[in-house]
Image (cartoon, grey):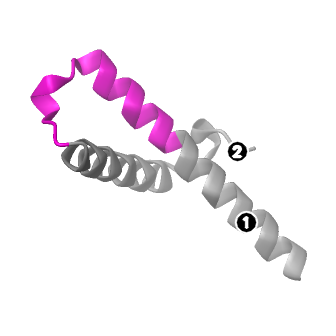
Amino acid sequence: MATLTKLPRPLRQKLRDKAIDKVRQDIIHAGRHESDYSDADLAFLIGEKEKEHTSELQSRLCTSYAVF
């Protein structure tokens, strides 16, 4: 599995932005506000979403290589 540090910086930033957006959506969906969470909690949630997005990207890359 690719780690975030092995990905190019622009891609890492895009994954982080996507993770932040998803965490915000999840918070709203849960009927809560960002202020309900500590900075450490938000950092953890964003980190977990980044891992999910990185895993999805890795899976797609493996699938695309398998097609060729």
Magenta part of the protein: which range? Answer: 31-50
Residue labelled with disc 2: 2
Residue labelled with disc 1: 61
Could you tell me the amino acid type at mark 1? Leu
- Badge 1 crowding class, 10 Å Cα cut-off, few under 14, some 14 to 19, many 20 or more, is few
Residue closer to the observer: 8 or 61: 61
The quadrant where residue 30 appears:
top left
**Contact (Cβ within 8 Å) of mark 2 with mark 1:** yes
Quadrant including the C terminus = bottom right
- Residue 45 vertical position relative to residue 26 in the rendered view, above or below: above
- Residue beneath the point at 34% across and 51% down: 22
Residue closer to the observer: 20 or 65: 20
What numbered label is drawn on residue 19?
none
Which of disc 1 and disc 2 is earlier in sequence? 2
Query: Image check: 57 left or right of 16?
Result: right
Quadrant including the N terminus = top right
